[in-house]
Amino acid sequence: MDREPAEVATRAGAGLQHDSAAKHVSGAAVYIDDMPELPGLLHMALGLSAHAHAKIVSLDLKKVHAAPGVVAVFTARDIPGRNDVGPVIHDDPIFADGLVQYAGQSLFAVAAQTVELARAAARLAVIVYEDLPAALTIEQARALGLELEKPQRMSRGDSAAALKSAKHRLHGRLEIGGQDHFYLEGQVAMALPQEDRDVQIFSSTQHPSELQHLVADMLGVPSNAVTVEVRRMGGAFGGKETQAALPATVTALAASKLRRPVKFCMDRDDDMLLTGKRHDFVIDYDCGFDDDGRIEGVEFVLASRCGYSTDLSLAINDRAMFHSDNCYFLPHVSIVSHRYRTNTQSNTAFRGFGGPQGMMGVERVIDAIALKLGKDALAVRKVNLYGPAPRNITPYHQAVEDNIAPDIIAALEAKADYAGRRAAIAAFNAANAVLKRGLALTPVKFGISFTTTHLNQAGALVHVYADGSVHLNHGGTEMGQGLFTKVAQMVAEEFQIEMAAVKITATTTAKVPNTSATAASAGSDLNGMAALAAARTIKERLIALAAKRFSCTPENIVFRDGRVHGGTASLSFGELARAAHLARISLSSTGFYKTPKIHYSRAEHRGRPFYYYAYGAAVSEVAIDTLTGENRVLRVDLIHDVGRSINPALDLGQIEGGFVQGMGWLTSEELWFDASGKLRTHAPSTYKIPAASDRPPVFNMELWKGENREETVHRSKAVGEPPLMLAISVFSALTDAVASVADHKIMPHLDAPATPERILLAVEKLRPVL
Ligand code: MTE
Ligand code: HPA
Ligand code: MOS
């Protein structure tokens, strides 16, 4: 498309800053806890279970009621409708009722005059538990056969026969830890009672429509009595796709009962104790391959810790299966997935949604093959990549039609001087007994679309006011990723007006109904298209009017740089809007979009679940100290595919943030439960997310030049989640560094996260303590 440079600088394709950037850094951006408090506002806190699995013999709340400042206390008995926030299966009580299923589960809520009084009162309950046997780990649940649903199996070809006939064979196990979302803004909601029994809720949620429906069911009122609004979240990362429901429902309950405004801002420790996290996994693999390391057959058995309820675990574990191939053609493959029910927090969506865990399995297989054959792991990666038919069919039978992984890898290998640095690292390791370096290049192929097909829809609402200014609303939510900016860019582009003329407004169920969560990285794909559809409807009406005014055909009307031209005549966009209003033409429209081409049979695990794939690759170089296990990421080079970027600045921000978050998952963030099932890492003092100083000192990021072959908005690609998985290169590089102590002859026993402790243990297994 030809565009003048001046236009490019202001609209679609421009690296504009986030619409709230200045507000974010100055502190002026309003989050829910910053909103003005109405008179009479009450604050809430929850009483949490101290036991992992127990009958509640008695729950004595007299002291809680009597505590200073307490106005009301709520338990399961006070809920007029359904005591449940389960998004798919109704197994997620708001308040545990007679039975607790994890340490940290909510039992009751207190509404008090201040936050401090509410939190203090919540600790005064006298609870008598009768303990039941608790399954805390994957292995405990496996031994007891506690599964959320029957094991799922995805397969193609005859893996058993391929394993038998392969020249080489190896099997092994990888354990992968979970991850807390650690959004800067914790879970929070504020509810205001409205006329009749209506309630208005401000929630930090990725999924306003679901909260609307859950609150309505909880109160026993229709959906039209509940409005949910969110202007922005201070980070979500999947942790607010379902987990925002608890504060939203308890504040709505209290507001509805007490007829007073109510706010619940979770304490960080409570937030970490209460809410679900990334699923931890155990992956067993059995692989057969040839002398080149080409995989002939592979069997994966995935097992994950889902926690006490279903939440989104079925779809998350499906996505782990979908990404067990990553970029590699697996000629004969079987993937079996077990979803274990445990007495821990109900694990939930987290950036990548199971995909990262699935990919870790096959990347470990490749590292193990390389060590067994004495080859460079990159060479083994390359011989296994998807290629032309017939080497282009995924384990779920979708054909990979847009494979650019080989091109990205080749470009990155050259750019990052992989071969030169491999030689330099070998020399360094030969010369140093204590410090060892490692290097790895790993690719990413991530499927874009909700794998639950019906979720791939979106709506928008656009108003053009008579002065030509625009009000933009859509079903997507803003969590820092820049969705609102991108969608506004598309609307400004369509009308050919300045970004400043497009007002970005808060997401609300009152304007766009029945939306999907902003998730699966599909926010801009879905909402961008819906907003464009709305804008195009209005534009068509304006074109018809302008053609009449300028006495030309509609085809000759051109929107350019704030003006609408027809032949030699023109009007400003505002003048035309005014004329349309006077001519009694509607300047408001909804827009709707649904993703084409996708379909999936979950019963057979077969179909085309993904509209397209997003690709990328990264090379990471690390150093470890073999006496302490300490480690650093020294340098990262990456190339990532965002199709034709709507906003390169925001896209690079997503790539950098995703990578560093992935690094944290695989290196320093460790969830630690004690023997009774209590999470002991529930604050930043014990749970280590990457700090600014952990950003790799050399970090070269590049956007792949290309466009989406599918007809997405601006031919762009989703970017929110895929870059997180580029951090698997860090884990592989650490594995490589550890393997160097045994001359790359033995596969290290290194699980994730590769904390200093685990690295040290892995080193010591490979060589005697110095
Ligand atoms: N970026 C920021 N800054 N904050 C977030 O919470 N969430 C991630 C990703 N990037 C997140 C983020 C997740 S899990 C998803 S699914 C996508 O953003 C959602 O937004 P999108 O669909 O608009 O990309
Ligand atoms: N990704 C993120 N969230 C989801 C998905 C998905 O594929 N399916 C249902 N919720
Ligand atoms: Mo993202 S895990 O799909 O919210």
Image (cartoon, rainbow, N blue to C red):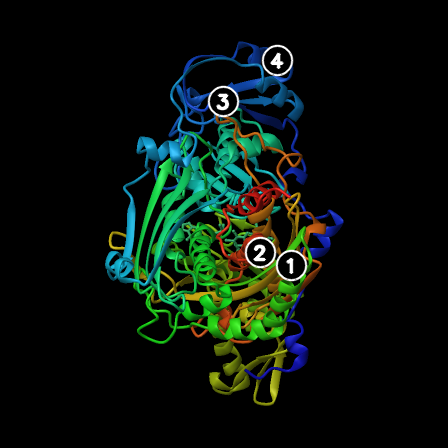
Along the polypeptide, which appears first: circle 1 or circle 3?
3
Q: Quadrant of residue 368?
A: bottom left
Q: Disc 2 residue type?
A: Ser
Nearer to me, 52 or 416:
416
Q: Nearer the viewer, mark 3 or mark 4?
A: 3
Residue 275 visible to an observer of this rendering: yes
Q: Which residue is mark 4?
A: 67
The residue under the point 50% across, 40% down is 277
Along the polypeptide, which appears first: circle 2 or circle 4?
4
Q: Which residue is mark 1?
A: 429
Q: Quadrant of residue 424?
A: bottom right
Q: Residue furthest right?
A: 26
Residue 571, how many percent across, how many down?
Answer: 62, 79
Nearer to me, 687 or 555:
687
Q: Secondary structure at mark 3?
A: loop
Along the polypeptide, which appears first: circle 2 or circle 3?
3
Q: Which residue is mark 3?
A: 49
Q: Which residue is mark 2?
A: 740
Q: Disc 1 residue type?
A: Asn
**Marks 2 and 3 close (CB-CB < 8 Å):** no
Q: Nearer the viewer, mark 2 or mark 4?
A: 2
